[in-house]
Amino acid sequence: MNKDYSLAGKRIVVTRAREQAGELIQKIEERGGEAVVCPVIRFVPPPDLTVLDGALRRLSTFDWIFFTSVNGVAFFFQRIQELGVSMEEFIGRIAAVGKRTATALEARGLSVQHIPGKFTAEHLIETMHDKLKSGQKVLLPRSSIGREVLPRSLAALGVEVTDAPAYDTVKSEGSIAQLMNELKAKQIDIITFTSPSTVRYFLSGFSLAERQRYLEGVHIAVIGPITERAVREEGLQVHIVGNEYSIDGLIESISNYTG
């Protein structure tokens, strides 16, 4: 089997949080590219755990738990352990956005009853219509800055939603200064973004004039349409969009890009 060197000679910036960047870095390097690690976000427990703690203490009352990210899974179970709550109290069903999220749950011995074919909140709602009933209770442990589309759409279906902040996404200081030097020297080919928060926090380190000057000639690659929208809202062009809304899909799209 011939080795894929489709990214040979490309210097590709990885803006994911450090603890999540490994997979993308590995896949870039496997295809001959050089990963430039610049984590612009990090994940921390939220300052107020009241809603999540209350939900965890009444797990048996929920019909569904919707997990929208691997982070949500990790912080959810971290808090369960801290409170001494048993997951055995939960007798409902679980939905997960994305294969990675489902795998993280299955690694903890849980069965996932629903995974949408496309890894977005919109598609989760679209594919759950026949599974949800008015009056059911859904727990949504997720980022404190999560989009409102999921709880709002669930509420519109008559479902009682507990939107429980399980973690905060905050800016990781200190990474952008070094990268700016490389951008000035025109040593960067592609910048990858895997969430709207990576877009916002990355660009917060640049003035409007610096964006135009330093990002000229740099191609922007995003994991899917939600992140693409965030880039366009910042006034920048998106060159590459992942075809599966996953790290694998992002890498494939970058590898096939000929611009």
Image (spheres, grey):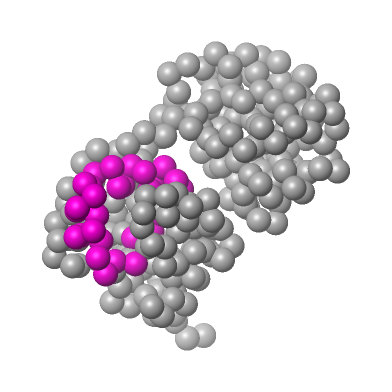
The residue range painted magenta reads: 191-219
Whether residue 2 appears in magenta in the rendering, the answer is no
Seen in the image, is 80 located left or right of residue 23?
right
Residue toward you, 233 or 146: 233
Give percent across and percent down for residue 134: 84, 28
Q: Residue at x 63, y 44 (%)?
A: 121
Give percent across and percent down for residue 196: 44, 46
Whether residue 94 appears in this view of the structure is yes
Name the quadrant containing residue 244.
bottom right
Whether residue 108 appears in this view of the structure is no
Q: Residue at x 66, y 14 (%)?
A: 57
Q: Residue at x 71, y 15 (%)?
A: 58
Q: Residue at x 66, y 32 (%)?
A: 152
Picture layout, residue 236 above or below residue 7:
above
Seen in the image, is 9 located left or right of residue 59?
left
Residue toward you, 171 or 231: 231
Picture layout, residue 158 above or below residue 54:
below
Q: Residue lying farthest bottom?
A: 2
Whether residue 207 appears in magenta in the rendering, the answer is yes
Give percent across and percent down for residue 148: 58, 34
Residue toward you, 224 or 238: 238
Residue toward you, 145 or 61: 145
Name the quadrant containing residue 170.
top left
- Total marks drawn? 0
Give percent across and percent down for residue 116: 71, 51
Picture layout, residue 217 above or below residue 225:
below
Which quadrant: the C terminus? bottom left
